[in-house]
Amino acid sequence: MSYRISVRALCEFTAKVGDLDLRFTPSPTALEGIQGHLRVTAGRPAGYEREVSLSLDFEDLQVRGRADGYDASTHCLEEIKTHRGDLSRQPDNHRQLHWAQARLYGWMLCEQRQLAQIELALVYLDVDSDRQTRFEQTWQAEDLREYFERLCRQFLGWARQEMLRTALRNTGLQALAFPHGSFRSGQRQLAETVYKAVSTGRCLMAQATTGIGKTLGTLFPMLKAMVPQQLDKIFFLTAKTPGRQLALDALRQVHSAQPDLPLRVLELVARDKACEHPDKACHGDACPLAKGFYDRLPAARAEAAKAPLLDRAHLRDIALSHDVCPYYLSQEMARWVDVVVGDYNYYFDQSALLFGLAQEHQWRLAVLVDEAHNLVERGRQMYSASLDQRTLQTLRKQAPAVLKTVLQRVNREWNALHKAQIAVYQAYDTPPTLLLLALQRCVAKIGDLLNEQPEGLAPELMDFYFTALQFTKVAELFDDGYVFDISLQQGPRQSSHSRLCLRNAVPARLLGPRLAATRSCVLFSATLSPRHYFADLLGMPADYAWLDVQSPFAAEQLEVQLAAHISTRYSHRQASLVPIAELIARQFAQRPGNYLAFFSSFDYLQQVAALVAERYPQLALWLQERQMDEARRGAFIERFQAGGQGIGFAVLGGAFGEGIDLPGSRLIGAFVATLGLAQVNPVNEQLKQRLQLRFGAGYDYTYLYPGLQKVVQAAGRVIRGVHDQGVVVLIDDRFAEAKVQALLPNWWPAPIACA
């Protein structure tokens, strides 16, 4: 048995040395790289060979790859790299890595074609100027062979260790038993359907009530399928931190049930949460953990590989013990683990790490998407962008002289749009071409300046740079699933500025290919109805499978009350305050305990809470606040003690509307004083128009379906187990409509009217 590895991966493992250095960035996107390669090779003479497939064995290794191009008439093999900025600013270890790849390809070609000597060339293409820079070296085949074999020997120890571990892991997974001995009601059906989906290579949407153990019910069958389906990786993707913790806890249970199973698990966290020196730039001249990063990485990687579960805390301890950056150690370990637990953006974002690695290494993937109802809005956010004119105006006053001209050009084009605006808000079918050209030139100029100043640029300039860069990238994706709009904002002293937005309305075209790139992708949630809404907006394959798991809960466990005599519409809000306060107090008096009361906004929440506190001072109240940090959110949840009595006020769709677990008497009821409908404003009306044109259901897709999902999620906090008893009070006359009630869980009993 041999271990297969790509030329690029072999070089990255063995030939990377020196500092971590992100100054020569941002790199071109994958698409820009592909297009750049095509432009370079299009200018080569007849007979030039493109994408030359090469493969060579050395002991237990099989090294494979595709050389970018070869000219047989000159015996010259080319390695093509795309870049931005002044090439003279490229760190030495970047160039060294590129030469390593060229030398490996050189020997493999010499061996394949029996060449005694070869010309190697690094060709760098600046994607902004289209300028090519070429470096050449002449090599003897024997010298290249020695270099190839030296790198292979460096990697062989790790490769043999990996083959042994994988064999033991596979044996362990085949013998793996369900950690709890028996499945919960509905959990077995979910697990069996997930296993069938990955076995047949299909994507699955699974709707399953909270409380059946969806996390373990999806992870366990994927682990069991890993060997028969030859999966390289399982990605468990979540929208929020609590989802990551549930996945890590489930995987700890797997390890506890079978302690000798050599399954590697990694938790990926955001860079701003993992960074040890947020005040320093990511290069060796600024950050001590970037200095000599690649020299110390092998020892850190070797220690990390011994840990079965690399959660955030454990990986940080290992990284700091070797003086390397925890964030970039986690990115390295993503290559060497079996299961990765992280946020949606690591796979679905435009420049997603996990998707990029999967494409580069051609991994066979299974992806689990937790609380998948969140992916619609998160997908829109990932592929949207905005620019605020105030930022540009401030920057122009502070920017270096070398940037004055390009910033002035951006400002001039922006002002032209601003002056042509005939309304406070205006939407357009296409983004502004002249402004985009000015932004692209500005981004390129700032990138050049960044490369010239290793110490970095002012934070305000860096923020504008990355925001403008994102805007230009998103503009390239613009189609009829987007809205470009301009909003005029009134400033002090009657001055005005504008905000430009590229809003994604239909992320299906962008998310769909990510789903299709997997062996199987399972999207699961308690609220995936109506299914066509999610299939349309997420880009589900035509042959996707659907499962609606029968709820383990009985209608007798839940009382649903309907306060149809109250309207929570904005125009009726003042009149609703007293009836809602009385309703809350009356329900509490009838059945004291812990309740959650959900409202459409902080203002509404505070108005009702103030009235309840004034009229019923004996009731214990605690309120969600704007921008609560993790500690304050934790304190809010801790107020819900078993046997306690009080009411927590929260905003629907916020931190306490989903993803929290308050079983038994920790929570016995919920008041939902809103349908959760998005605010009717010009932006949402534009979104409605786009969705109406595409799907013929603009109102439902913009307002009704997203709103009712929030309601059901919030109400789902009440019944968490088969022995729980509770009440949900729906407050609004629109809850009585048949169309609305059809979107409520089918296991709920019929609502009863409350006075």
Image (tube, grey):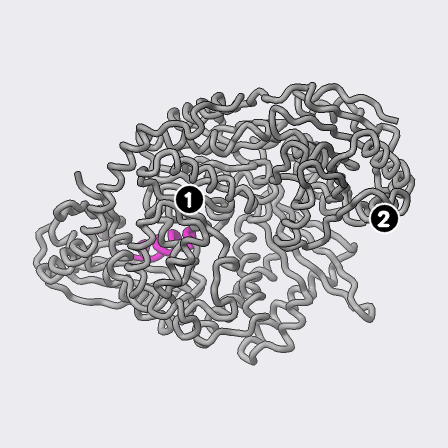
Q: Nearer the viewer, residue 320 or 16?
A: 320
Work out which residue is located at the far bottom of the displayed protein and give it: 401
Give the left or right position of residue 702, taking residue 279 as reference.
right
Q: Which residue is the site of mark 2?
A: 610
Please, what is the three-letter code of the amino acid marked with disc 1? Val
Residue 10 screen position, x and y as percent: 25, 53
Vertical relation: 404 (above or below) 207: below
Q: Quadrant of residue 744?
A: top right
Dominant secondary-structure state across the stretch colored magenta: helix
Asked if the stretch drawn in magenta spans residue 540, the answer is no
Start-end of magenta stretch: 30-47
Location of the N terminus (image quadrant): top left
Work out which residue is located at the far front of the displayed protein and give it: 643
Residue 340 is labelled as: 1
Q: CA distance from mark 2 to mark 1?
A: 45 Å
Q: Nearer the viewer, residue 626 or 97?
A: 626
